[in-house]
Image (cartoon, rainbow, N blue to C red):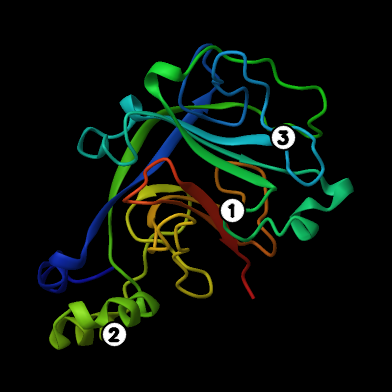
Amino acid sequence: MLPEEIKHKLATLSRPGWRPRVGPAVPGARSKFGGSPLLKADESWPCCGHCHQPMQLFVQLDSQDLPVDARTGFGDGVLQVFYCTNGEEDCEVLGHAHLPFSDASLVRMIPRQQADGFDALPVGIPDAFVEQALTGWQCMVDFPDRQETVAINEYVPDGMVALLQAHRPAPHAGDKFLGWPHWVTDVDYPPCSCCKKPMKFIFQIDSTDTLPFWFGNSGCAYVFQCENNPQVLTMSWESRP
């Protein structure tokens, strides 16, 4: 816990983050973990590019269900994260699922006017997650960790970097929207596949937090979006050593 005086001095580096609260499935709920996604008109369930089987819906967030102060976090529409959990085909390894823009995952934002009805959960998804509805958000304040200060060092006064190094604040672990990423190994903002500029952090999915799933060795996944091309999104994850 940082002393209040130190928090005040580091305030310019702080970022608000929000931890999701979840409860039992609610029929018709748009924001959820697991379950059935909203799909575009006449669209089939997204499949893995490696095994060609349906991927699991990990997260779906309607921007209207975001915290009031963060409703422009990714644009006006529905953010979706799909990931292949087909262990029989070993898509996680052969499909390089930990890397951005992998064929074994899909991250997208459906514009509001294109989001259609729900599709039934495919019987082909083994061990499908039990759907959990988003019920609210818990706000928290994140500070960059020591690894992050190396990347931002040229933009931060020396005295502030020294405070960060001395007090070692850590971004919050667990599932969260915005804030600073809780890197488990190295700082790694992927370049956009179009403009090649570093993408911005949107959402964090931690192992066995809300979803009963492990990313490698208790790792953590990160969702990113291009600031210049908002329709370009991706996910990557890091495994703990």
Position in image of residue 81 (x %, y %): 55, 39
Q: Give the CA distance from mark 3 to mark 1.
A: 14 Å
Q: Is residue 183 above or below residue 17?
A: below
Q: Can you identify the residue that label 2 sits on?
A: 165
Q: In the visual, does 89 lie left or right of 15? A: right
Name the spot of residue 38 as percent of width and height, x first. Answer: 54, 20
**Residue 201, position as x, y percentages in the image:** 39, 55
Mark 1 vs mark 2: in front? 1
- Inspect the image, locate mark 3, and give the three-letter code of the amino acid beneath it: Cys
Q: Please report contact status of discs 1 and 2: CB closer than 8 Å, yes or no.
A: no
Q: Earlier in the sequence, mark 3 or mark 2?
A: 3
Q: Which mark is residue 18?
A: none
Residue identifier under label 1:
101
Disc with the residue nearer the chain's start (3 vs 1): 3
For the residue labelled by badge 3, is the local secondary structure a helix, a strand or a loop? loop
Separation of marks 3 and 2 at Cα, in angstroms: 44 Å
> Looking at numbered disc 2 in the image, what kind of residue is underneath it?
Gln
